Image (tube, helix red, strand yellow):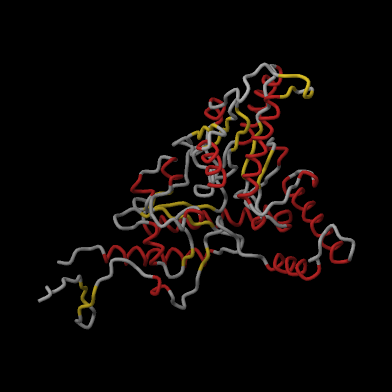
Amino acid sequence: MEKDKVRKVIPAKDGRKIPRKTECYEEENNSVKRKVYMDYNATTPLALEVIQTVTEAMQEAWGNPSSTYKAGRKAKETISRARESLARMVGGQPEDIIFTSGGTEANNLIIHTALRCFRESWVLGENGPGEKHSKPQGATPHFVTSSVEHDSVRLPLEHLVRENMAEATFVPVSKVTGQAEVDDIIGAVRPTTCLVSIMLANNETGVIMPIPELCQRIRILNQKRTASGMPKILVHTDAAQMIGKGRVDVEDLGVDYLTVVGHKAAELVNKTCEVYEAHMQEVRDYLEARLEAVFGKQKIHFNSRFSGSRRLCNTCNFSILGSGLQGHKVLSCCKTLLASVGAACHSEKGDNQPSSILLSCGIPYDVAQNALRLSVGRDTTHRDVDLVVDDLKEAVAQLEQSSTPLT
């Protein structure tokens, strides 16, 4: 005979015994409860003005912009206006704007541009092809980046290293500030360094990197390199997370290349950035205060608070401490909250491992595995925050009850 199966049960109010579930399932979350989106660092719901503009462009500006007929001229005008708008947004010139299919392509383009520039400048003198530098042929280009970069920077560099096409140094971030420190970056520079790529703001912790200070140091270093006939070091920053959440100006930053992404950039940023920034910071601070009030300071660890560092106005990365409260389990029990445990590009990996970004920042393993990243937006309200915190409270209670041994 088949042995009787032992099942955990919990008593119901009417005396019945029902099976105890150890995790929440998706079907339980298909309720009519209102959903609250707090994943703005992944992408932003389209504003009505943006939808109208895109719709108009698709209806009226569908032509080839190099053509002379009406739809072609309209397309050319639309692209020109967009280029001018983006240039105003980042303090650049329209002719310096290059459109790509997205941030990943843009970052790859910059990496391979730096690679080509290095090969050309390493072989040829500044005054043209007739003048050779006294440097060994076949020198390997070197890249400097941080240990917390987006995959669209990290993975191409790792590929180039594997193919023996480049060398790369991934500078660890400070466990005190969460930043890639300027001294550490400069210390990683070699004679063959062609590009330094450091993100402007981290997409998981929200920590803002010291890009202006870094560019000042590299500018001084480049003066010395030029005097000795060495190639210039180019500087790139991925500013995808900063757009719409803080001021971005290429002149103030001092970078050679800057990446922004279309779904986070619009004419709205030029008009309302300061208002949105103030609103998002106030709501983010309210969220953190509510989390502490509901769960208690001993049960909440804020993974994005680092001494001496600024962070994005909208980002709150935190862990609810306790066994069995891994971030993915908490989210699976939430009926209202729509959010992520970390970067959206890592969410589908399925291994449920702690964020490598948080581990690099010195967050302990058991804390990092419980992490949730909530990022608010221009439309997030105090009421939304209250609903989300209540939802989290219920989810945690459900998980804690399911893990309590029966007596």
The image shows residue 179, relative to residue 302, as above or below, that is: above
Residues 79 and 255: in front is: 79
Which residue: 54% across, 25% down? 187
Residues 250 and 64: in front is: 64
Return the x and y of residue 92 as percentages of the image width and height: 76, 43
What is the quadrant of the C terminus in the image?
bottom left
The image shows residue 17, relative to residue 291, as above or below, that is: below
What is the quadrant of the N terminus in the image?
bottom left
Return the x and y of residue 230 as percentages of the image width and height: 67, 21
Return the x and y of residue 217 as percentages of the image width and height: 63, 27
Residue at the left extreme, as displayed: 1
Return the x and y of residue 343 as percentages of the image width and height: 50, 53
Residues 171 and 212: in front is: 171
Q: Quadrant of residue 41?
A: bottom right
The image shows residue 352, relative to residue 16, as above or below, that is: above
Residues 251 and 343: in front is: 343
